[in-house]
Image (cartoon, rainbow, N blue to C red):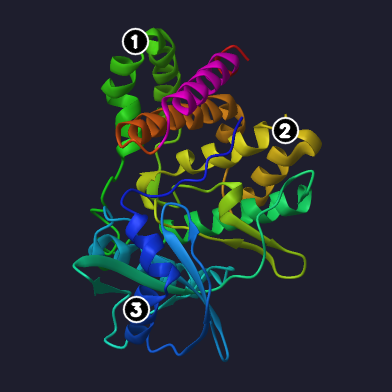
Amino acid sequence: MAVLVLVPAKLSIYVEKVYQTVVAEKALLSFGVDAQHISQPLFGSNAVVKVASMHSEYALRLHRASRSPQRIDRDLAFVSALRQQEGRRLPCPVKTISGDYSCTVLQEGNEFRCSLLTWIKGEPRVPGHGFGVASARQAGGALGAIHRYSQSLTSPSSASSVAGMEGDFRLSRSVREGDDAIVTLLPELAPLIRALRQRLEVVLDAMPESGVIHGDFILKNLLCHRTLGIGVLDFDDSIMEYYVLDFAGMLENLDQVHNEGGLQTAFLEGYASAGHDVAAVHEYRCELIALRHYAGIAWAIGMLSEQRISKDYFDEVTQYRSAEIRRLLTV
C-alpha cells in the first residue's frame, strides 16, 4: 500500500514562510530561545521545525488551523505532568516567557499557533528493521505508564484539567451510534460495518474503563534509541476515551507483519508490567485491529472531503481496509 505524506490544509503559507524562517524566528522569541540553526519543516498533521540552540535541540510545531489554543495548552499540560510523574522518554513542553504552552504569530495577516518541545533522540523503527521483541515490550510499558497516570487523575481538580477535550469519546460514539458518513458514501460496506459495530459493542461492554488516552499510539509516533529506549511523541489526539481503544493502532501495526516473533504478545506483556490486566485485550485482538481499519476508512472520508487526498488513493485505502475488516471478522 502506498505511503501518503500529508500536508495539512492551508499549509502553502506554512511552506512559504517557514522555509524563510520568519514565523519560526518570531515564535522562538516568545519562548526565549536563541536559535543557532532552524531546519526546514517536516510535514505531518502539524509542520515541525527542528531548532538547535547553543545547548539544546527543540521541536517547534506550527499547528493545523483547526487546533484551538485551549486544546494545545491542555494537551501539553497533560504531557508535562505525565513526564514528571512517570519519568518516561517524552518531549518536555517549553513554556513561553509569559508562562503559556503556546504562542500566536501574526505574519502578513496570517495567524500561526506555535508550541515548543524538547527534541527526543531516536528514530521510528518497524518490525524486521530495528523493532523487535524488546522494543515491543518497551512500547507496551510506555502505553501502560500513560494509562496508569491517567487513572491517577481521580480528584476533582485533576479531572477538570483533562475533561471536556474536543472530540472526547468520538470514536466510541461512532461505534455505538454508527457513522453515517461511511454508509452514505460507501453503502456497499453497510453490512460489514454493522457486523463490526456489533462486535465492538461487546468489546466496549467488556472493558468499560475510560480516561485520557494517547489516541494515536502507533509505530511512527515511537522513537527507538539503542541505549535510551522508547520515546513517545504526538499527543495531539489525546482525549477521554475507553482505554482499550489505545491498543488498536499498535496491534494493527504489528498485525501487518503477521505478528512475527510474538511482537503483539511482547507488547501486551510490557503493558501488563505497568500493573494492568490484558486478558480481555488478548481475547478481542481481532476486533481491535478491525477498529483501526474502521477508523482508517473514516479518516479517508474526511481527507477526501477536504481534497487532501486523491480519489484513487481514497479507493485504495477503503478497499484495503474493508478487506482487512472482513478477514479479521472471520478469524
Q: Earlier in the sequence, mark 1 or mark 2?
A: 1
Separation of residues labelled 1 and 2 (CA atoms)? 30 Å
Residue at (23, 53) in percent of width and height: 164
Q: Quadrant of residue 304?
A: top left
Vertical relation: 279 (above or below) 266: above
Contact (Cβ within 8 Å) of mark 3 with mark 1: no
Relative to residue 281, is residue 257 drawn left or right?
right
Tell me which numbered mark, 3 or 1, is placed earlier along the sequence: 3
Residue type for callout 3: Ala
Q: Residue at x 26, y 50 (%)?
A: 166
Taking 104 as reference, is 162 above or below it?
A: above
Which circle marks residue 187 in the picture?
1
Residue at the spot of label 3? 27
Residue 122 vs residue 118: left or right? right
Residue at 44% over, 68% down: 19
Q: Is residue 221 above or below residue 172?
A: below
Q: Amino acid at mark 1?
A: Pro
**Residue 155: percent from the left, percent from the top?**
30, 64
Q: Residue furthest left?
A: 109
Secondary structure of residue under mark 2: loop
Residue under numbered circle 2 = 257
The stretch of residues the image draws in magenta is 309-327
Q: Nearer the viewer, residue 35 or 191?
A: 35
- The label nearer to you, 3 versus 1, is 3
Count all numbered tags in the image, as a single digit: 3
| Residue 64 picture quarter | bottom left
**Mark 2 neighbour class, 10 Å CA radius: few under 14, some 14 to 19, many 20 or more:** few
Mark 1 surroundings: few (<14), some (14-19) or many (≥20) residues within 10 A: few
**Residue 211 at what x, y percent from top left?**
37, 50
Indicate whether residue 57 is drawn in magenta.
no
